[in-house]
Amino acid sequence: MSANILVVEDEPAIQELLALNIKQAGYNALRSLSAEHAQQLLRETLPDLILLDWMLPGMSGIEYARRLKSDNLTKSIPIIMLTARGDEYDKVRGLEVGADDYVTKPFSPRELNARIKAVLRRRAPQMTDDPIEVAGLSLDPTTHRVSGNNVNISLGPTEFRLLHFFMSNAERVHSRTQLLDKVWGDRVFVEDRTVDVHIRRLRNALMASNHHDLIQTVRGSGYRFSAQTVEKTT
Amino acid sequence: MSANILVVEDEPAIQELLALNIKQAGYNALRSLSAEHAQQLLRETLPDLILLDWMLPGMSGIEYARRLKSDNLTKSIPIIMLTARGDEYDKVRGLEVGADDYVTKPFSPRELNARIKAVLRRRAPQMTDDPIEVAGLSLDPTTHRVSGNNVNISLGPTEFRLLHFFMSNAERVHSRTQLLDKVWGDRVFVEDRTVDVHIRRLRNALMASNHHDLIQTVRGSGYRFSAQTVEKTT
DNA sequence: TAATATTTGTCATGAATCTGTCATATGACA
DNA sequence: TGTCATATGACAGATTCATGACAAATATTA
């Protein structure tokens, strides 16, 4: 599931350019011409990143950013502001209201992509295309390949995403609900217990290279992907 | 089939310089002194990239860019604008009308080439006409020939482009949509599933030299052209 | 120009694979 | 030991792909 990026920009030409760029980079572009309309879109899908123009008709970009950051539902969505000039003052205010980064117009496509990638990496590492390797187990999102100690491992789509998420967020416990949100995506309604089954399928597949014990059960909390082996208390 | 680059520049000296540079880099240079003349050229050949001077006699560069981007036939041709020294305002307007990148005069040949290359790669990585060879299967863009282990393979136009794209972007998974964009071009609207059919046709053709299994299906994601064979792990 | 190939996009169908849920077994913890 | 959370195997429904057929569009040839 590639990242959804919401572009809030009132100038159609620039919006188009941004959207094109985003698609080119392999993300999914949602578009909105105003803060008000963006707000509506948010009801359906929560994007993984918001590109927000500084100046907007109606509610200004900065105003909207503040609002997004104060709403519990959206506060964790990273925001990249598009500012007109390299104005230091703007920059300060942008960061003040909680923007995660900003890009000054005119921007080069490369710069924009680099920033998007950087921000996404911070917030949702599994959304980037970087290959990951943990304890001899490696996963490459671009080739969609997984191998453990040179043994090829084939996974179904969901197991692949699950492993991808685990590997990009290792050493940390994830509740079933969190996993559903991050791996399945919000707006999907699935039983919590279903996660168990997929964990099992993933473990099964990883058995081929003896990496199945990297996925640890944390009783009462969820699961954890960890390179550190668990010591059994005897 | 090396990329054609159209240079629209009224100053003969600069045009000459640009053309030289382009040829040096192995591309094909088409030249035009005005937007009007360029328009005529476009009737014969659609270039793969347009280098457009900001200021032109008659129709200005920006005006022309806008026009190119609004015409269905030419809208997908990337444009690099040549702007006078670091004029911020120009850059904004350039991007506004849909230019893909810009180079400020005076430019260094190296920078120009880098940008051309980047834009072309983003647009059509398979545009270079170097022969490619993977696992005994070879494709020569100039002669339009494909052969596997000395067996000649004949392909329809679309299958040829598809294979060309695959071979120049091997090992990586491409979604159907991406394939449509890159192989069919972004101005066509065809069903996603159509890709399946062409994949099959290509596989069929490659069967002649037993290379059909280089094209792998990645369930839920798309297709991949890979020299590495898949091992089934159950 | 007419006739004949080729090429292309779409569809219907059946096969392969994936998914979510349940029922039951197992194991952890107080 | 009893209770509760997790593991596991089975399964039916849902997706996703492969494939053959076909007609429209294009190119080629007579």
Image (spheres, coloured by chain):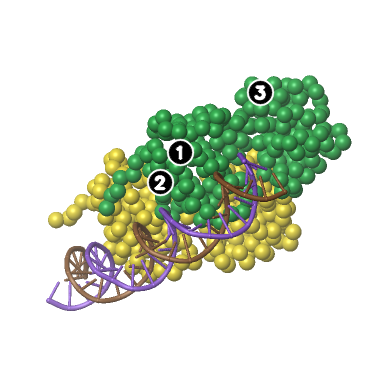
Chain colours: A yellow, B green, C brown, D purple
Please state if A215 lies on the left or on the right of B63 as rendered.
left
Q: Is residue B177 left or right of residue A232?
A: right
> Counting residues from the N terminus, which is met first, the one under dot 1 or under dot 3?
3
Check disc 1 and report its element: helix, strand or loop: loop
Q: Chain of mark 2?
A: B
Q: Which residue is mark 3?
A: B23
Q: Can you tell which of label 2 and label 1 is closer to the viewer?
A: 2
Asked whether, in this view, residue B47 is left or right of residue B182, the answer is right
Seen at 28% across and 59% down, the residue is A200
Q: Are marks 2 and 1 on the same chain?
A: yes
Comparing labels 2 and 3, the label whose residue is closer to the camera: 2
Determine the CA span between mark 2 and mark 1. Answer: 11 Å
Q: Nearer the viewer, residue A138 or B234?
A: B234
- Rounded to the nearest angstrom, the CA distance separating label 2 from label 3 is 37 Å
Give how far apart the Cα atoms at labels 1 and 3 are. 28 Å
**Sequence-first disc among 2 and 3:** 3
- The residue under label 1 is B170
> Image height check: is A38 above or below B120?
below
Check chain identity for marks 1 and 3: say if they share one.
Answer: yes
User: Who comes first in sequence, dot 2 or dot 1?
Assistant: 1
